[in-house]
Image (tube, rainbow, N blue to C red):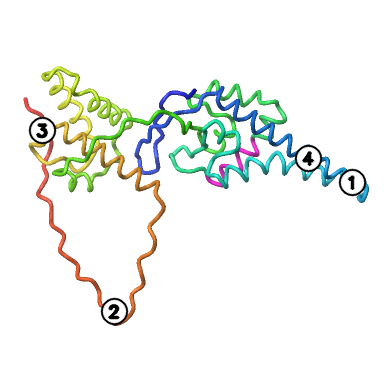
Amino acid sequence: MVGPQEPVVTGDAVVLDVQIAQLPVRAVAALIDITVVFLLYVIGLLLFTLTITQFDPALSGAVMIIFTVLALLGYPLVFETATRGRSLGKIAMGLRVVSEDGGPERFRQAFFRALSGVIEIWMLAGGPAVICSLLSAKGKRLGDIFAGTVVISERAPRMTLPPPMPPQLAWWASSLQLSGLRPEQAELARQFLGRAAQLNPAVREQMAYRITAGVVAQISPPPPPGMPPQLVLAAVLAERHRRELARLQPAPSAPPPTWPGMQQPVRQPIPQPPDSGGFTPPS
């Protein structure tokens, strides 16, 4: 059971559609994690009692406090950091913690979530976490709000793939500035292209020019003159998707070193694209 589709805006102003995890699924994952922590704590407590007679009461109390903090704070911190946003409960339920910009959870964010979880889940029996999740549009508990994270479902149905890049517009799309494109406008374009074949031709043409004009007004440079509006929309959405995938991939390795006297490869001249003009819908 997953939540509604929600747009997550990345740092490059690209919208990544995800499935927000609903409260019941997160509650089951939390119960699994609580059970694991409880079992580990009991096992550690039994092992500690075997050697407690070797310490004085003050040292034994200090060790117990440290052990309790490590069990409650260390488990989610270590697991979510090592698995990039997943604990044993989240792995079992197909959930993952990600940043609000769509990137993986960072150590700082995992620490804030774990620290908040000690208070809102363990000390207050999960009451604040449940109330906050019900009030939040993205199902966030207090730890998610402080850390800037959101819990998503990895077992959600695959989203509709973006349209393929029109070859004649690839050069133009690679130079686009997409930071001004609003998420709702891009989502409108995606839904239109997905349903265009089902529309009446006259209605489809009218909607295509209207939606394309709204998209072109928020990006730069404008498309080449005379391009069909559906191709323009497809190029924009395909380029957004390509940049998002490139951002999520690891950084490329450094280029090989060059040494004095090493023969350098001959660089071929880059062909220049034709001049582009504005997009003008027919009257």
Please tell me how crowded label 4 is: few (under 14), some (14-19), or many (20+) other residues with Cα within 10 Å: few
Q: Please report the residue visible at 21 percent of the width from the left and 44 percent of the height from the top.
A: 173
Q: Which element carries disc 4, helix, strand or loop?
A: helix
Give the mark nearer the N terminus: 1 vs 3.
1
Q: Which mark is residue 43?
A: 4
- The question of residue 103 being in magenta is answered with no
Q: Which mark is residue 262?
A: 2
Q: Which mark is residue 52?
A: 1
Q: Indicate the amino acid at tag 2.
A: Met
Q: Please report the residue visible at 37 percent of the width from the left and 31 percent of the height from the top.
A: 158
In the image, 215 versus 59, the foreground residue is 59
Q: Which element carries disc 3, helix, strand or loop?
A: loop
Report which quarter residue 14 is drawn in: top left
Give the mark nearer the N terminus: 3 vs 4.
4
Q: Indicate the amino acid at tag 3.
A: Thr
Mark 3 — residue?
Answer: 280
Q: Indicate the amino acid at tag 1.
A: Ile
In the shown orientation, is residue 82 left or right of residue 183? right
